[in-house]
Image: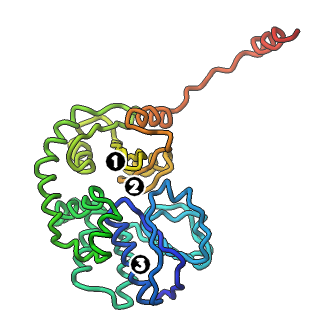
Amino acid sequence: MLTLRRPDVILTHDGDLDGLVAGVLLSRLARKLFDADVRLEAWNHHGLRQRPMTETTAWVTDLTFEPRMDRAGWVILDHHITDAAPKHAHLIHDPAKSAGRLCYEQACQHGLGSPALDRLVHLNDVADLFWENDPDFVLATDYANLVKIYGFWNLHALLEGEIERLLDHPLLEVMAAKRRIENPLGLAWSRARVQEITPGVGFVETVVGNHNLIVHALLEEQATRYPVLLTAVRRGNGVVSVSIRSRNGEALKLAERLQGGGHANAAAATLPKSVRNIPEALAYLRQTLNPKPDVPLQSLAELFDAIESRKP
């Protein structure tokens, strides 16, 4: 069993159900072990890169391990692909499990498991790892969509930190209705509105429905010639974020070029604050992702002529 030190802070991902489940479970574990309410912070990948890492001890989950987290007294529980190897921190890493599952395994070692959490963590696994062949896949996407629609801290407040109350929550009826009504309408609309970003990357315009499921359907149907598809949304704070999906592992590589992260086929990135709307996002993506054309060098004679012409 891992010996844990009391953390100064718990850091988790703010954008999905996995971050909510993992963060809350670590908060409970800290309360059980140290009889203390440790500060929980939720971050997106871009924001985390701007955050100073000054704490002596920290628990980090559902956020890709990076070298600046490699500090004695830090514990990272994550499943995102990383090239960094810890020398000082303790990394619990398994790409085949959700971050929520990794945190739940630690919680269960200290008696914090329950049938309700068993069920919720399973649904989180299905949604976050996109187990599309699981019989609970459609239901699990409804659970995951709760966080995307209502927001991390809004749900945390509504549930008063008791994530088990998500099970069979009345808001799931809203998610199911949105899925049944909006997804077919949104898919039909988006199918005809895919714009080229690069020869291998398409931007999918969206209006209604679960954007991730719409893009998944487009990739499954091979409805476009692009192996990678993007969607974008402007958040309430004015920041534009992009969601990236693929079938052959290209999504994460693209997200990393945009200073984001995620999984091989499901990733995301937050664009710079100077990008204020979707048209500006498209322009930024085209400029950033398209390779710059090689500019032919001037001949030596042309270069010398240019130098001579500037002499007084």
Q: Earlier in the sequence, mark 1 or mark 3?
A: 3
Q: What amino acid type should be assigned to the residue bearing mark 2?
A: Ala
User: SS for tag 1?
Assistant: strand
Badge 1, how many Cα within 10 Å: few under 14, some, many 20+? many
Q: Are marks 1 and 3 in contact (CB under 8 Å)?
A: no
Callout 1 amino acid: Ser
Identify the mark nearer the N-term, 2 or 1.
Answer: 1
Q: How far from the left and from the top, in percent, is residue 50?
A: 56, 56
Q: Residue at x 38, y 90 (%)?
A: 110
Depicted 65 relative to depicted 303: above or below: below
Residue at image location 38% in from the left, 89% down from the top: 109
Identify the disc placed on residue 264: 2
Residue ID for mark 1: 246
Whole-number angstrom distance, CA of label 1 to CA of label 3: 31 Å
**Which one is nearer the viewer's eye here, 303 or 278?**
278
- Residue 26 - label: 3
Report, in whole angstroms, how far the alpha carbon at label 2 lies from the one at label 1: 8 Å
